Amino acid sequence: MNVIPTKSKEHKVNTITEMCKLFQVSARTLRFYESKELLFPIRKGQHRLFTKSDRGRMKLIMQGKRFGFSLEEIRQLLNLYNFGDHRTRQIKQTYQLGLKRLSSMEEQKKELGMAIKDLKSQLELCKDLLLKRGADSRDL
Amino acid sequence: MNVIPTKSKEHKVNTITEMCKLFQVSARTLRFYESKELLFPIRKGQHRLFTKSDRGRMKLIMQGKRFGFSLEEIRQLLNLYNFGDHRTRQIKQTYQLGLKRLSSMEEQKKELGMAIKDLKSQLELCKDLLLKRGADSRDL
DNA sequence: TATTAATTTGACGTTTACGTCAAGTTTAAC
DNA sequence: GTTAAACTTGACGTAAACGTCAAATTAATA
C-alpha cells in the first residue's frame, strides 16, 4: 500500500479527446481556451495533457457560459480557484471581483425568479385560450 | 370627459430616441431588432413609432438576453405575448416552446443557486488566506 | 422660409467564440 | 520499421449582435 495517498483521480491527466468527451466541446474549443489563458494543460512533448486544475476550470467555464458571462469575464474569476500561487495584491483584486460577481449572480437569480413567474402566468393565459378554442387538454 | 377610457399610457408611442433612453440601447439596436422581427414599430411617414407592444417586447428581449438566450430564441417566445392574432396551431407550438423554456429557466435557476453557493465558499477560503497574510479585515 | 435637428436606409467594419481545412508531427499498433 | 490514428500549428471562414459612417429625407424651430 502506498504511504503517500496517491489519489489517482486527483492526478489523472486527460488527452484532448478525453476532455472533449468529458465536457462535450470540440478540440478547437479547448485549444482556443488555452490561447485565451483559461486553461493551462501541461505538455508531454508537443501534446497537451489536461490536469485536475483544467477540469475544475472547465467546469467553471461551462457554468459561466450558461449564465451568460463572456470568456473574458470568466477568465478573470478563474484565478479565484488558484489563488495559492499569486501575490496578495492580485488575490485581493480577484476577491473584490468575486464579490461583485456574487451579487450580480444573486441579482440574476432574483430576476430569473420573477421572469419564471411571469412566464408561468402567461402560459396559463395561453392555455386557457387554447382550451376555449377547443383544444384537447391532454395535448397541453 | 372621455366615454372611452383612453389609457394614455397604453396608447402612448415613443420615438426611437425615447426608446433608446428607456432601454439604454442604441437606435441601431432597435432597427436591428425590427429587421429581425422582434419589434414592429408603426410608421408615421418614414419614421418609426414604438407602441406599448414594442415596449413590452423590449422588456422581454432585455430579460432574455440577461439570461443568455439568443435573439432567435427570444423571438420565438415573444409570440407568447401576442397570441391573440395567431392561428391555433401556431399558438400550440409557441405554448409548447414556452413550457420547454420554462423548465430550462427553472433548471438554470437551480444551477445558479449551486454556483452561488460554490462561489460563496470559495470567497470564504480566499478571505481566510488574505487575513492570514495580514490583510486588514476592513478592506474585505 | 431657411436651417437645424432627428431619422432614415444602405453598406461596410468589428468583436466574440468558435468551425474548418491544410500540412506537418508524434505516438501506438502491427 | 512502417503505417494509421491522434495531435499539432497556422490560416482563413463564419454567425451573431451590433457599431460606424455616409448620404438622403423629414420634422421642428427660428
Image (cartoon, coloured by chain):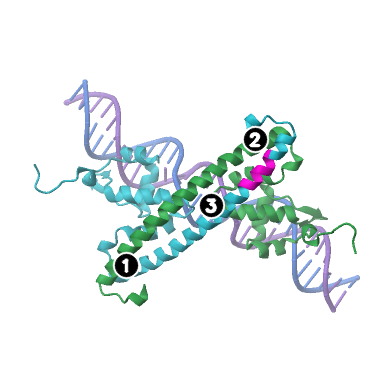
Chain colours: A green, B cyan, C purple, D blue
User: Residue B86, image x and y in percent?
Assistant: 27, 65
Name the residue nearer the viewer: B118 or A90. B118
Q: Is residue D3 above or below residue A116?
A: below
User: Residue B137, image x and y in percent?
Assistant: 66, 31
Task: Determine if the magenta segment contains residue B32.
Answer: no
Secondary structure of residue under mark 1: helix
Q: Which residue is mark 1?
A: A127
Q: Amino acid at mark 2?
A: Gln
* Secondary structure, magenta segment, majority class: helix
Q: Amino acid at mark 1?
A: Lys
Question: What is the spatial separation of the Cα atoms under label 2 and label 3, in whole angstroms?
Answer: 22 Å
Tell me the residue at 48%/59% (across/down). Answer: B106
Tell me the residue at 43%/61% (across/down). Answer: B102
User: Residue B11, image x and y in percent?
Assistant: 21, 46
Magenta-colored span: B120-127
Q: Quadrant of the C terminus of chain B?
A: top right
Does mark 1 fall on the same chain as mark 3? yes
Q: Quadrant of residue C2?
A: top left
Secondary structure of residue under mark 3: loop
Q: In front of the other: label 3 or label 1?
A: 1
Tell me the residue at 28%/40% (across/down). Answer: B15
* Label 2 Cα crowd, 10 Å radius (few <14 / some 14-19 / many 20+): few
Name the residue nearer the viewer: A32 or B73. B73
User: Residue D21, image x and y in percent?
Assistant: 43, 35
Q: Amino acid at mark 3?
A: Phe
Chain letter belonging to callout 3: A
Secondary structure of residue under mark 2: helix
Q: Which residue is mark 2?
A: A93
Q: Which residue is mark 3?
A: A67
Name the residue nearer the viewer: A77 or B79. A77
Q: Is residue A119 visible?
A: yes
